[in-house]
Image (cartoon, rainbow, N blue to C red):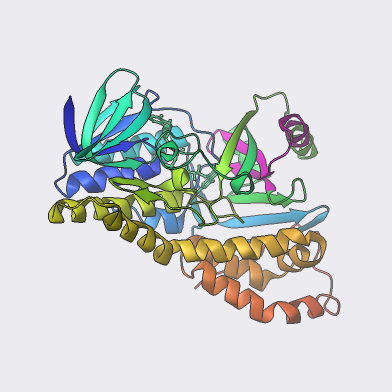
Amino acid sequence: MKGYDVIVVGAGPAGATAARHCARGGLKTLLLEKDQIPRYKPCAGGVTRAAANELDFAIPESIIERRCRGIRVALGKLKNSIKCTETLSYMVTRSNFDEYLVEKAAEAGTAVHDGQACIAVSSHPQRIIVHTDTEDYQSNIVIGADGFHGRVLRALRPGFDKEEIRFCVIAEIPMSESEISRLLDDIVEIHYGYIDMGYAWLFPKREYISAGIGGRLIKAKTLIQRLRSYLRSHGLRDDVRVRGCFLPISRFRHNVYAERLMLTGDAAGFVDSFSGEGIRWAILSGKIAARTAIRCHEKNRFSADEFKEYQDQCFSNFGADLLRSAKLADRLFGHPWILLKTALINDRILKMHLKTITGEISFREYADWVRIRFPLFFIKRFFSPKKENTSKPTHCSLL
Ligand SMILES: Cc1cc2nc3c(=O)[nH]c(=O)nc-3n(C[C@H](O)[C@H](O)[C@H](O)COP(=O)(O)OP(=O)(O)OC[C@H]3O[C@@H](n4cnc5c(N)ncnc54)[C@H](O)[C@@H]3O)c2cc1C
C-alpha cells in the first residue's frame, strides 16, 4: 500500500490550497479527486477580493471573466444599487479556477490523482487509511475537502443537521458579451424575497450569466419554477438546464477534527449564511489545516488534541465572524419587509457590507456597526425622501 504524510480528499479550493501548502512545507502529499479535472462545479463563481487576497499568487487574467465593481439589490419591486471604484470580486468559471488551483498544488510537489473517489476512511493506531474505488492508501493525516457529500465527514458523523442545509438551483444562460454588459455590466444582482433565508442572483461572466436561487430547503420543483419566472422577469431565456445542489452552513456545534483528521471548506460547513460565500473560507481553512499538518509532523504527534488547535484557529480566524453573520442573517431574513428593507435602501449599510467583501472589515465589525446604528436608520426611513426603485447606482469609493 502506497504511503503519504498527508492525503487530501477533494480538489476544490479547500483541497487544492491545503495540498499546495502541505507540499510546500515538505510533506509528501496526495490530492484525490473523484472527477476528472477540470470538473464542473455548480457555483455562481464570485471570488471576493478578500478570498483572492488569501491566495499567495494572482489569479491569471485568462481566468478572470469580469471584475465586479457594484451590487444591485432588490426586494419585491424595491431596488437599490451601489457602484464602487474598486474591484469587489472576480467572476470566474469554477472549472477553470479550480483547475488552476490544482496546477499550483502540483507545481508545489503534490501528487494529483483525479478520477479516483474516496469511498471510506478508516483509522488505525499508527496510521489512517483512505479507501478509494481502485486502490487503498495509508497516511499520517487525512484532510477532508470533499464538500457537502464528502466521505471524510462520514468518518466523524452521519452528515449535516437539517437546519445547517441550504438548497440552491442554478443555471447558466449563454449570452453575448455585449448583451451581458447591457444587462449587468460589472455589477451583480441580488434579489431577496424569492426564498426564505436566501436570494435569487444574476452574476455576469464573459459569455454567460450565472443565475440561481438558494436558501432554506424547499421542494426542488417549486424552486425551479421560481427560477424560471425570475429569468423571464429579466427577459432572459428560461429553457436552460437547471441543476440543484446543497450548501452547508455550520453553526459550529460539531467538531471538525478527530485523531489524524481535519475537515475543511464545505465539508466543515464553512459558508457564510447571509451571502453564501464559501470560497474564502475554503481557502483559509485549507491553509490552517496545512499549517496544522506541518506542525504535527514536526512534533511527530497525531492525537486528537493536536488537531483541536486546527478547530480553535478556524474559529478565532473566521468562525466567530461566520456565527455573527449568521445571527445577523437570521434577524434580517426573519423580518424582510421591516429590517431587510431598511438595510437595502440604506447606502451606508450597503457600503459597509461591500467592505466585508473586500476584506477591509470583518463581519463582526460590520454586525456591530449595523447593530448600533440600525434604530436610527430605521426611524430615518420614515422621514427621509424615499430611495426606492433607483435605476441609477450611487457611486462611491470604499476608501
Ligand atoms: C449554487 C452555489 C453558488 C455559489 N456561489 C458562490 C460564490 O459566488 N462565491 C463563493 O465564494 N462561494 C459560492 N458558493 C459556495 C462555494 O461553491 C463553496 O463554498 C466552495 O466551493 C467550497 O469549496 P470546497 O473546496 O470546500 O468544496 P468543493 O468546491 O465542493 O470541492 C469538493 C471537491 O471534492 C470532490 N469530491 C467529493 N466527494 C469526493 C470523494 N468521495 N472522493 C474524492 N473527491 C471527492 C468534488 O468532486 C469536488 O471537486 C456557492 C455554492 C453554491 C451551491
Image-based side of 191 in relation to 363, left or right: right
Viewer can see residue 17: yes
Residue found 71% across the figure and 77% down from its top: 374
Up-down relation of residue 286 to residue 374 (above or below): above
Residue found 83% across the figure and 53% down from its top: 77
Query: Of residues 78 and 199, which is closer to you in this image?
Result: 199
Is 219 contained in the magenta span? yes
Viewer can see residue 84: no
Percent of width and height locating residue 261: 32, 45
Q: Quadrant of the N terminus?
A: top left
Image mark count: 0
Query: Of residues 91 and 16, which is closer to you in this image?
Result: 16
Image-based side of 76 in relation to 169, left or right: right
Query: Of residues 306 and 264, which is closer to you in this image?
Result: 306
Up-down relation of residue 69 to residue 247 (above or below): below
Image-based side of 377 in relation to 353, left or right: right
Image-based side of 196 in relation to 270, left or right: right
Magenta residue span: 199-226
Percent of width and height locating residue 76: 82, 52
Looking at this view, name the residue that lies furthest to the front.
125
Q: Quadrant of residue 351?
A: bottom right
Residue found 31% across the figure and 31% down from its top: 32
Q: Quadrant of residue 169?
A: top right
